[in-house]
Image (cartoon, grey):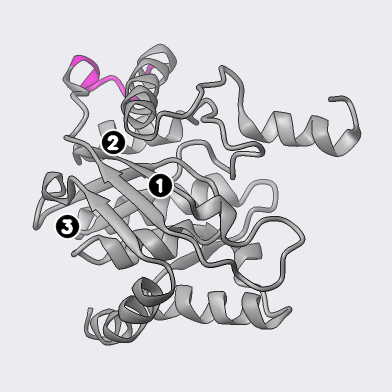
């Protein structure tokens, strides 16, 4: 926590100076105790802005590919992620889900704030895609409240193919915890996990105003990569 605090005192003012942050609803995030912050996902840089905006330390489990050491922008982003305590996971087959769930439960078990992007990957076109049900399993298994969060503008900072970040105003809106009580104790039921996840995604959509898409972002990206769409 001391390292996180020290890093944030340096990173936060610089980030806010370059990209002004418009924040709403931060009072919905409990000051202590376990909490899941569920956000839309527009850019690889999203965890940085959430970490800067939220008063508490927020831990994300990010794909290992994000911790790149390529160009200057990538190296700077990687160091910022590590400085504010973000963890990387191996996304190779058989590793990602189990490792991520074990680490996530441990983080929440320690009474910490945990950030998650239910879409599982960045939106390919700025719309809001279907949520992965691992979110609901984690919430129902841990008992931690889920607070929805919506980002705006991060996708225009470092779009695909751009090496130098653009100067943009960023918006962050936080809503009240989502009521998942109808599905308490049912994390083992697929239908309950889907219903609970959909409830969280609906809350995120109300905050973001994004067009909802009843498909998974990963499948759309795969089609785009193969030229099918």
Q: Report the residue at 61% width, 59% height from top.
A: 90
Query: Of helix, strand and loop, which one carries label 1?
Result: strand
Whichever of labels 3 and 1 marks the residue nearer the N terminus, that label is 3
Instruction: Tell whether position 184 is magenta.
Output: yes
Give the SS element for disc 2.
helix
Q: Picture coordinates of residue 93 (x, y %)?
A: 69, 47
Judge the density around disc 2: few (<14), some (14-19), many (≥20) Cα neighbours within 10 Å. Answer: many
**Label 1: how many residues lie within 10 Å, few (<14), some (14-19) or many (20+)?**
many
Say above or below: 11 vs 20: below
Write down the region rendered in magenta. 182-189
Measuring 39% from the left and 20% from the top, which residue is drawn there? 198
Q: Mark 3: few, some, or many residues within 10 Å (few <14, many ≥20)?
A: some
Observer-side mark, 3 or 1, equals 1
Q: Is residue 170 left or right of residue 57?
A: right
Q: Can you say which quadrant of the picture contains the N terminus?
A: bottom left
Residue located at (72% from left, 29% from top): 220
Tell me the distance, in whole angstroms, between the alpha carbons under discs 1 and 2.
21 Å
Q: Which residue is mark 2?
A: 139
- The C terminus sits in image quarter: top right
Q: Quadrant of residue 141?
A: top left
Q: Quadrant of residue 39?
A: top left
Task: From the image, tell me which residue sits under label 3.
Answer: 111
- Give percent across and percent down for residue 151: 40, 47
Taking the magenta stretch, the answer to whether it contains residue 53 is no
Q: Report which residue position mark 1 lands on.
A: 151
Position of residue 104 relative to residue 75, above or below, is above
Name the element at disc 3: loop
Give the CA separation, mark 3 to mark 1.
Answer: 24 Å
Q: Earlier in the sequence, mark 1 or mark 2?
A: 2
Q: Position of residue 22 (x, y in %)?
A: 29, 55
Q: Nearer the viewer, residue 29 or 59?
A: 29
């Amino acid at each position: 926590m001391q390292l996180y605090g020290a890093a944030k005192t340096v990173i936060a003012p610089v980030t806010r100076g370059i990209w002004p942050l418009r924040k709403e609803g931060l009072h919905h995030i409990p000051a202590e105790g376990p909490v899941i912050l569920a956000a839309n996902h527009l850019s690889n840089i999203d965890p940085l802005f959430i970490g800067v905006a939220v008063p508490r330390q927020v831990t994300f489990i990010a794909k290992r590919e994000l911790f790149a050491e390529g160009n200057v922008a990538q190296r700077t982003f990687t160091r910022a992620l590590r400085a504010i305590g973000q963890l990387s996971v191996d996304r190779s087959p058989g590793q990602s889900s189990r490792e991520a769930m074990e680490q996530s439960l441990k983080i929440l078990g320690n009474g910490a704030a945990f950030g998650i992007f239910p879409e599982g990957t960045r939106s390919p076109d700025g719309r809001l895609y279907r949520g992965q049900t691992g979110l609901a399993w984690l919430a129902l298994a841990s008992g931690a409240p889920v607070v929805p969060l919506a980002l705006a503008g991060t996708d225009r900072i470092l779009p695909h193919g751009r090496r130098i970040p653009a100067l943009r105003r960023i918006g962050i809106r936080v809503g009240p915890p989502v009521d998942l009580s109808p599905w308490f104790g049912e994390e083992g039921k697929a239908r309950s996990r889907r219903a609970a996840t959909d409830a969280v995604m609906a809350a995120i959509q109300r905050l973001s105003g994004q067009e909802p898409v009843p498909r998974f972002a990963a499948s759309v990206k795969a089609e785009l990569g193969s030229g099918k769409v």
